């Protein structure tokens, strides 16, 4: 009786692959970026008080990307806006009582939902007051950042600095502690 060793090797490799994949899924493998957000060191407090600001992070597909790209932020952040009901949004809230830096971790469950949707971009939006520069159509609204989603990027952390006139990608040391 001759035993075919190659079948045993193949079966062994399938079993090892199955358990390795299962271990990755159970351990919550990183499927996104770490996104830190906070007030910039040079944020000019009006009256020495931190304002209430909502920062939304949205994963978009090619279909929803065009919609968010053109959507006015004053309308987006208006109460009872229906567009937000159909989107998966990660929210960060800042206020006088809660002004410390916030973080969306790379293993938060929202990344799995966004990955399942096949997102291609991330939008980071802030309900900062509209400035004269933001209201002109000649420049991009600085209260909105668009980041291509590429999970294989070498950069795994994105730092977002909240300034008086908009949002900026920053070095972590530029965020207040």
Image (cartoon, rainbow, N blue to C red):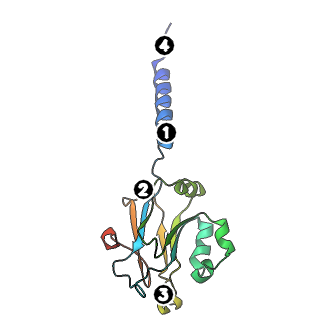
Nearer to us of marks 2 and 1 is 1
Question: Dot 4: few (<14), some (14–19), or many (≥20) neighbours within 10 Å?
Answer: few
Q: CA distance from mark 3 to mark 1?
A: 46 Å
Does dot 1 land on a helix, a strand or a loop? helix
| Viewer-nearest of discs 3 and 4 | 3
Spatial distance from mark 3 to mark 4, Cα to Cα? 72 Å
Q: Report the residue at 67% width, 68% height from top.
A: 85
First of labels 1, 4 by sequence position: 4
Label 4 sits on residue = 3
Image quarter where the C terminus lies is bottom left
Q: Are marks 2 and 4 in contact (CB under 8 Å)?
A: no
The secondary element bearing badge 4 is classed as loop
Q: CA distance from mark 3 to mark 2?
A: 30 Å
**Residue sitting at x 47%, y 80%:** 51
Report the residue marked by disc 2. 152
Q: Is residue 153 left or right of residue 126?
A: left
Q: Please report the residue visible at 43 percent of the width from the left and 87 percent of the height from the top.
A: 46
Callout 3 secondary element = loop
* Separation (CA) of disc 2 from disc 4: 43 Å
- Report crowding for label 3: few under 14, some 14 to 19, many 20 or more residues within 10 A (C-alpha): few
**Label 1, on which residue?**
21
Q: Which residue is mark 3?
A: 139
Which of marks 1 and 2 precedes in the sequence?
A: 1
């Amino acid at each position: 009786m001759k035993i075919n060793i190659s079948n045993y090797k193949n079966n062994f490799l399938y079993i090892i692959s199955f358990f390795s994949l299962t271990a990755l899924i159970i351990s919550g493998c990183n499927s996104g970026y770490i996104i830190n957000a906070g007030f910039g060191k040079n944020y000019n407090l009006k009256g020495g008080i931190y304002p209430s600001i909502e920062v939304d992070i949205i994963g978009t597909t090619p279909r929803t990307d065009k919609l968010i790209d053109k959507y006015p932020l004053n309308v987006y952040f208006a109460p009872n806006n229906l567009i937000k009901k159909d989107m998966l949004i990660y929210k960060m809230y800042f206020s006088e009582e809660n002004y410390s830096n916030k973080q969306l971790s790379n293993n938060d469950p929202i990344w799995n939902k966004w990955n399942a949707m096949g997102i291609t971009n991330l939008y980071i939006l802030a309900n900062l007051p509209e400035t004269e520069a933001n209201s002109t159509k000649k420049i991009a609204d600085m209260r909105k950042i668009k980041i291509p989603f590429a999970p294989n990027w070498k950069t795994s952390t994105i730092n977002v600095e909240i300034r008086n006139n908009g949002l900026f990608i920053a070095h972590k040391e530029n965020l207040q502690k």
